[in-house]
Image (cartoon, rainbow, N blue to C red):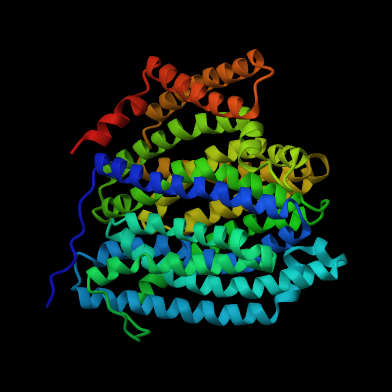
Amino acid sequence: MNRPIKQPSANSSQVARSTVLVASLLAADKLIGVVREAAVGRAFGMSQALDAYFAAFEIPEGLNVIVTGAALTTSLIPLLNHIIPRADPDALWRFVSSVLNWVLLVVGIASIGAAVFARPIILMVAPGFADDAAQVALATRLMRLVLIQTLVFSASTIVTGTLQAHRHFLLPALAPLCYTLGRIVGVVVLAPRMGIFGLAWGGLGGAVAHLVIKLPWLIHHDAHWTRTLYHPELPNLLRLMGPRMLGMGATYVSFVLPTILGSQLPPGAISSYEYAWKLMQLPETVLGTALGIVVFPTLAHIAEQRDHVGLRQTFSWALRLILTLSVPAGVGLLVLGRPLTAIFLQRGAFDAAATERVYWALQFLALGLVTHSALEVVARLFYAQRDMWTPFWAALGGLILNAGLGWALLPALAHGAIALSNSLGAGLQVLVLLAVAHRRLGGVKERALIKSLARTGLASLGMGAVVIGFRVLMPTAGTLTIGVGGLALGGTTYVLVALLLGSDEIRELPRLLRRT
């Protein structure tokens, strides 16, 4: 019989280096994603067809998120951390096969049901479309196509969770690049002949590539699929998934809210918010998501050992690092969002007025860059301990704040209200989870966290002041000069001021990356 696949140990240096690897690939994906958004903007601008395209994704994306996305990955990884050191490879692949079979069965049945009732579903998630029968019909047809993509992503997500549990991050981090490239092919090659459906077909091709790129790892480790639907560990997985699915359901509704609320506004509001959200996600994914992905298996391994001291230390370090990087990024997004939006997107059908509409939402999402980045790590502290209920209650509170505030401020702030309420909803989740973590772990090194946040805040304010001064002193400079020059000057200023203020995170990061 084959020897079990060994699970490597991890320390802060390994986590930091793996984070840089994942962050670099995610950054490449997001930069290529900017090219994709520019191509989409050039082709479709703020059109009703693009609004229909975004609306078509709501239910398929919900299936992917709730059943197979973060819900399954965050439940599967802690369980695999328990199984891998104890099971032989045959038993491991039987377990993975049973999970895969059930997910494909459930998502397949749900997708068929969603395809049958696609039209009323579109009217539910985008009630403002009701007066335009052509837009409803277009969104309905698009949704049925996107549901096929969701089924492919279901299988791909199971494979991603398996690789990450073994602390293999390269291929899962390359997979989003494949999806993004597929969508670029769709908008550049297919859309001129097929319209918005070209973008949808390109996404389906990208989803297939998202799965296929991870197959070499499975082949190398002699992975094999079986038809089994039962495994003794399945009940444990379902116990973890139940509350996690509820939590992701609350999170998913917060992602549907922009479509529900935006459909009440003039055409283009949904697209304006979606463009701003994608721009915000560029730094958020590189900073928050990358570290969250890499540190999660380590947190799960420490939690499995019941080492509360190690758990507290690793979590506190990861949170301080996230804030050290995300706060200045949020300030940069606030003061440079307009020129960066113009540089990335303003061409073709995407004109100066579209840039202003996107920047209006982007200003409010600058706060969300910090809160969503912190949430990537804070929530995973609980998932690592197999506690799915606490994040659910926090997500439910965040959803209530998000929906109530967004609806109340919509007349005054338009799609900016959607962005602000989303950011504050994520912030509430972070605060609730930190309070519970403090009580459960006997503290989360609050003194070190407050000191680090104070240094970060002061350095970020200095950075913002320098960038604003740069813009004032160069009133006739072009958009490219302001955007690129402001980024370079602001980043340099932040690092220098942070070092002068004694930032341990900035000072130690290069050493962590060099350490063997």
Position of residue 341 measured from the top left corner of the image (x, y, whole percent): 64, 38
Please tell me which residue lies in front, 80 or 309: 80
- At 36% from the left and 18% from the top, the residue drawn is 502
- At 24% from the left and 43% from the top, the residue drawn is 11
Left or right side of 215 for 484: right
- At 71% from the left and 58% from the top, the residue drawn is 50
- At 70% from the left and 42% from the top, the residue drawn is 358
- Quarter holding the C terminus is top left
Please tell me which residue lies in front, 35 or 514: 35
- Quarter holding the N terminus is bottom left
Point out the residue furthest to the right here: 131
Please tell me which residue lies in front, 247 or 436: 247
Residue 102 visible within the image:
yes
Residue 436 visible within the image:
no
Position of residue 261 measured from the top left corner of the image (x, y, whole percent): 76, 54
Position of residue 53 measured from the top left corner of the image (x, y, whole percent): 69, 63
In the rendered view, tell whether residue 43 sits above or below residue 486: below
Q: Quadrant of residue 196?
A: bottom right
Position of residue 241 measured from the top left corner of the image (x, y, whole percent): 45, 67
Left or right side of 493 for 45: right
In the rendered view, tell whether residue 432 sits above or below residue 502: below
* Number of on-image labels: 0
Q: Quadrant of residue 393?
A: bottom right
Point out the residue furthest to the bottom here: 227
